[in-house]
Amino acid sequence: MLASQARFGKAGKSAEETPPETAAPWSPAAFDDAALAASLAPSVLAQALELARSHPVIEVIAGDGDTPPMARLPMASVIFYARNSLAHARCDCAQGGACAHVALAVWAFRQADQANGSQALRATVALRRDEHAGAGPGPTQGERAGAFIARCEAMLLDLWKEGAAAAPLAFEARLRMLEAEARALDWRWMEESLDELEQLLRALNARSTRFEPRRLPAAVAELWA
């Protein structure tokens, strides 16, 4: 008798039949500029601003309480796992998170919410310049140049340690982002060197006859220099 009563509540329904509570849907558009500045380095935000200048087409997919919201960018995809922290946003780029793609995804959600309303399940937007105009003052030219050089050196060090054939797609994504930064700095020789390295890695991955084994270490050395 006691066991039978324990299985039923006041309404006479079994506790096992009570549907579990689901989390309310939310949008990454709720992350404001202060949240972005607190979670992302100034150099990362500057990189995101440069990438946004090309007005990338981004598909945003709203969460439904069980599935987290996500954004599909031309170069990566970002999933937002927590509504109160950008630190839990994950990207499938080489950096994995706290990257420029996270900022682009947040801006895309803002634009989609403004255009279609917060109830839109799926929307594709071309990021506008005015969407991220309030991101605050960016770093100086010298700071951007220093951050760019540091990222180049980190990429080359990873390439040296992991090998050119280890993860070509990951390196390709990093090289494209570095090329965009070099273009923004108007460092054409660096942009050309990064493009050459990207082409060599792509040819190596495709086992193309265009790959020149001797040219790869030379290109890496020239870029480092």
Image: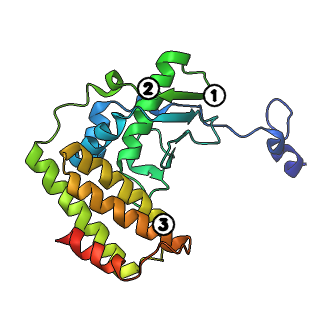
Which residue shows up at 47% across the image and 17% down it?
A: 114
Q: For numbered disc 1, what is the local secondary structure?
A: loop
Residue wearing tag 3: 202
Residue 27 is left or right of residue 136, and the answer is right
Q: Toward which corner of the image does residue 147 lie, by quadrant?
A: bottom left
Residue wearing tag 2: 110
Q: How crowded is mark 1: few (under 14 residues within 10 Å), some or many (20 or more)?
A: few
| Residue 192 image offset from top left, x and y in percent | 29, 57
Which residue shows up at 81% across the image and 46% down it?
A: 6
Calculate the distance from the C-alpha at mark 3 to the C-alpha at mark 1.
36 Å
Calculate the distance from the C-alpha at mark 2 to the C-alpha at mark 1.
14 Å
| Residue 60 image offset from top left, x and y in percent | 55, 34
Which residue occupies the foreground of this view, 157 or 113? Answer: 157
Residue 89 is left or right of residue 33, and the answer is right
- Nearest to N terminus: mark 3 or mark 1: 1
Residue 197 lies, with reference to residue 87, above or below; the image says below
Q: Which amino acid does label 2 sit on?
A: Arg
Q: Toward which corner of the image does residue 219 lie, by quadrant?
A: bottom left
Q: How many marks can you see?
A: 3
| Residue 117 image offset from top left, x and y in percent | 54, 17
Residue wearing tag 1: 121
